[in-house]
Image (tube, grey):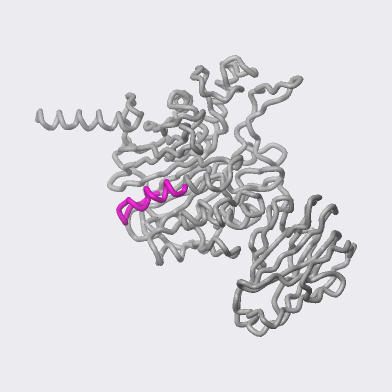
Amino acid sequence: MKKCTLLLCILLICIEFYCTDGRKRDIIFSPDGKWPDTVTVAFYNVENLFDFVLDGTEYREYRPGAFNWTEEIQQRKVSLTADVIEALEADLMGLCEVENIRVLRELNDTLKNRGAHYPYLSVAKSTSAVTTALMSRFPIIRFRSHPVHFGSSHRYRSILEADVRIEQDSLKLFINHWPSKFNEESSRLKAANILKQRLNSLPENTEYLILGDLNSNYNEHTTFHTEGFNDTRGRTGINYALSTAQTSPDCFTIRYKRPSDMVEPMGRFIHYNLWLELPENERRSYVFRGSGQTLDHFLLPPTLFNTTGFSYLSNSFEVFCWEGQLLRDDVPFRWQMRFRGNQRYHVGEGYSDHLPVRAQFVRHPFTFDSTTIYKPCSLKTVPGVFGSGRDGWVSADTRFKVQRDTSVAKLGKYSLKVSGFHSQRNVSAAKCRFFCSKRAKNASTVQMYIRGTGKLSFRLRGDQQDWIYYNYPDFKPASHPRYPLVTTGSLWKRISLALPENIEVCDSIELEIRAGRAQSFHFNVDGVFLK
C-alpha cells in the first residue's frame, strides 16, 4: 500500500512539472471518469497578449505605462481574448503571440471565474517578445520546445510540441508561429525543416496535428514568386518541406494532397491542409491590404485518416467569426490603436488581426462526409494573387503583380491581370510553363486573348534553347524584342505565337510576357493554350 501511495505521488509531481513548465497546477480529471469521443481543437493568433510586468523583451507599445498600455487596458485585452476562447468551446486551444506563462495563467484565471478554464497549460521557450502556447482540458503528459533562430542572432521563437492523454489514446500537437513575411521564404523553410526533422524521428503510427500561424498561404508555392519571397529556388516550407502538395522547384503547377491520398498514402511524410475543405472564396483567416490570406493552418498526417485512435471528422474545419462579432467592416476586428498626434495609443477595443480556426477529431475510423455544410466567414477582400490555376502563371519580377481578375473575362469566370511599372530596363512581367499532353502533342502555336495597354512583347523557348521573341503587330518569331506601345482599349485581341520547328512540344515550354520600360503596364490575358 505504501509503495502504491509513493508511486502515485511521484506520478502527480511529474504531471505537475510537465504541465506548467515546472510550476504547480491543479490536476483535474473528467468528473465521470470518461472522455468524450469527439475532441474539438482550435488555434488562435491572439495578437500580442502581453502582461503588465516589465521584462525588457516587450514591444515598446506594450511596456507598462507607455502608449496608454495601462493595467486597466491590459486587463481589458485579456478579458476580450477570454471571450473568444470561451465562445470557441475547444478542448485543446493552441495559441500564438502570447508573451509568457504569466499572462497565460492570467487568461486562464479569467476563464476560471467563468467556469471555462483549462486545467493544463504549457508555453514554449522563447527569447522573442511572444511565443506559442497550449491550453488543454486533458492532461499534458509531456512537452518540449524546438527553437527556430532568427538568422544568425541568438534570438529564437520555438515550435511547441505537446503530448495530450485522452483516455487510452495519445495525441501529439505541434503549435507553430513561423517568421513573418518581413522575412524571405528561407526563414520559413528553416522552421519547416526543423519540424520535419522532428516528425521523421517519430514512430510510424504517431497521431499528431500541425497547427499554427505559418505565415504562409495554403498555396504559397504559387504566390511567393509573385510576392518576392523566393530565395529558396522554388521551395516553400508549407508545400515542399511539409509535403502538402506535389511540387517541384522549377515547376509552377501544383497538386494538393487530398483525403484519398491520406487513406491510401503513397508515402509516410505527406500532409492534408484543411483549407482545401472550404470553397476557394472562403479561404481566409487574415486580410492583408484587402487580400484574403490563409496563414492559420491545420495540417494532418495519414495517421488521422486510418482505423485506429482518433480520426479527422470530415468537413468539421471552419473559420470562427462568432456570428460576425470578430469582424468590423467585414474584416477581422483587430486590437485597436489610434493616433494622437504622431503617437499611437491603445484604445481597449478589438480582438485580433487573425480569426480563429477549429476542427474536430473523433475516436472511430475516418469516413468521407459527402454532405458538406460550409460555415462561411464573409470577409471584405479583393481578389487574391493569381496562383498557378490551369494556366500556371506567376510574376517574373517583384515590381509586377499577377492576379486573378473576376471583373474582366473573355472565356471563363476570370482572366489573368498583369500590371506594374519599371523605369530602368525592359523586363519579364509574368511567366508560365507548358507541359506535354496528348491534346497538345501536335500543337504548332500558342493561342491567347489580350486586352489593355503598355509596351508589350512575348518570348518563349524550349528546354535549353535560346529565346524566341514575338512583337506587335504581327507577333511573328524574331531574334530580338521590340516594345511598341500597344493599346486595345476594352476590346479583346486574339493573338497566335507560332512555335519554331526545333521546339518539341513534349518538352516543357517557357512563355513570358515582357514589359517595356518607362510605361505603365496593364494587360489582361485569357484563354492561353497550345493549339
Q: Is residue 198 above or below residue 342?
A: below
Q: Which of 48 and 334 is in front in this view?
A: 48
Number of numbered discs = 0
Q: Nearer the viewer, residue 311 or 179?
A: 179
Is residue 333 toward the left or the right of residue 91 in the image? right
Query: What is the x, y in percent for residue 449?
Result: 79, 70
Whether residue 196 is in magenta: the answer is: yes
Q: Is residue 322 visible?
A: no
- Magenta stretch: give its range: 192-208
Query: What is the x, y in percent for residue 254?
Result: 57, 63
* Residue at 65% in and 59% down: 387
* Residue at 32% in and 24% down: 24
Is residue 218 toward the left or the right of residue 131 in the image? right
Say which quadrant the C terminus sits in.
bottom right
Say which quadrant the N terminus sits in.
top left
Query: What is the x, y in percent for residue 516?
Result: 81, 58
Query: What is the x, y in percent for residue 318?
Result: 55, 49
* Residue at 59% in and 39% down: 354
Q: Is residue 502 above or below residue 86?
A: below
Whether residue 84 is in magenta: the answer is: no
* Residue at 57% in and 28% down: 80
For the view shown, which residue lies furthest in the bottom direction? 442
